[in-house]
Amino acid sequence: MSYILDTVSNLLHETAFFNLTVGNFIMILVACVFLYLAIARGYEPLLLVPIAFGMLLVNIYPDIIASPAETSNGVGGLLYYFYALDEWSILPSLIFLGVGAMTDFGPLIANPISFLLGAAAQIGIFMAYLLAILLGFSDEAAAAVSIIGGADGPTSIFLAGKLGQTSLMGPIAVAAYSYMSLVPIIQPPIMKLLTTKKERSIHMEQLRDVSKLERILFPIIVTIVVCLVLPTTAPLVGMLMLGNLFRESGVVRQLTETASNALMYIVVILLGTSVGASTSAEAFLNVSTIKIVILGLAAFVCGTAGGVLLGKLLCLITKGKINPLIGSAGVSAVPMAARVSQKVGAEEDPTNFLLMHAMGPNVAGVIGTAVAAGVFMAIFNV
C-alpha cells in the first residue's frame, strides 16, 4: 500500500500544478487572451496563434526552451533550437524573403515620393530611442526596443539578436507583433485627429503603369545602393529584394511560390512559437517589460503621426494632390496599414480608393525600418 501511495504522490508532484508560480498562471491567462484575439477577433492570427501557444507551452513546461547546459542529458528543449534560429537572425531574414516574394513594389516605383512618407514614419523609432535612454535602458537596449515603432516584428527580433539583447527579445517581439495586429485600432484616431474632413476626402490620380523592366531593376538597384551605404542591412534588405526579384523576373515561378507560401508559413510557425516561448513569467513579468510596451506604443503613435504630418505638408506643396491619410501607411505593417488608410478615407467618401496609393509608403516603410536597424548596427559597430 505504501508503494502505491508513494507512486501516486510522485506522479502528482510531477504535474505542473506543483511547479508553477503565480506569474506562470498570469502568463497562461495572457496567452489565452492572445488566442482569443487571434481566433475570435481575427487579429493577425498567423502570428498571434503560434506566439500565444508558445507562451502557453513555456509557462506550463519551462524545460521546453531549456538549453543543453540546463538538462541532464545534454539535449536542449524543442523550442530552444527554434529560438536559436531567431538569435542567429536566420528566421527574420527568411521572413523578409517571403515578404519580398509576396509584395508588389509597383505603387512605390510609380510614385517615388512614397519613399519620403515611409521615411517620415520612422521618426517614431528615433523618438523611442531617446525616450528609452531617459528611462534607463542602455544604448543597445534602447535601440532594440525603439525599432518596435516600425511595427515590424522580424526586424525587431533581428536587431535585438544583433545587439546582444536576447534577454529583451521576448517582450520586444510580443510588443511589436501586438502593435502590428492592433493597427486598425490604434491608427484611425490619430489619423482623424491630425487631418480635416476635406483632406481625408481628397481623391488621388490613378498611378501610372510600371514596366516590367522597372520592376526587375528596382530590387537590384535598391540592394546595390542600400547595401553599399549600410552593408549591415544586407541580411534583411537583400532577402527582401531577392524575394521580390523572384516575383518580378518571371523565370523562377517555383521559387516564388515556395518563398511566398510553404517556406513562409514554416518560418512563421518556427518564429512565432519560439518568440512565444521566450515569454516565461520570469522573463516577462517585470518593470522592463512595462517600459517596453509603453515605449513601443509611443513609437508607433509618433511614427503614424510623422507619416500623416508629412502627408499634410506634401498635400499643401502639391496643392491638394496627395491625401495625407496615406502617410500613416509608412509604418511597415504590410498590407494592414495600407488597408487602414483605405478604410478611413472610404468612411469620408465611399468612392475614394486609396489602397494602391497607400501601398507605396507601406512597402517604403519596410525598407525604411530595415535601414533604421542598419543605422543602429553601424552606430554600435555590429
Image: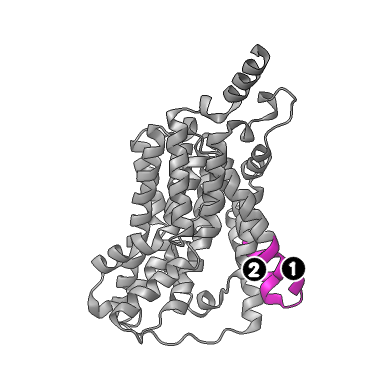
- Tell me the amino acid under the disc marked 2: Ala
Answer with the quarter of the image where residue 243 lies. bottom right
- Give 189 or 228, whichever is nearer the viewer: 189
Q: Quadrant location of the N terminus?
A: top right
Report the residue at 58% width, 41% height from top.
161
Chief SS of the magenta region? helix
- Give 175 or 233, whichever is nearer the viewer: 175
Q: Is residue 96 above or below residue 322?
A: above
Secondary element under disc 1, as helix, strand or loop, is helix
Residue 315 belongs to the span the image colors magenta = no
Please provide percent x and percent y for residue 32.
46, 47
Please provide percent x and percent y for residue 142.
43, 40
- Tell me the amino acid under the disc marked 1: Leu
The residue wearing badge 2 is 101
Please provide percent x and percent y for residue 286.
40, 32
Find the magenta span and give its range.
Answer: 239-262
Q: Is residue 347 above or below residue 136?
A: below
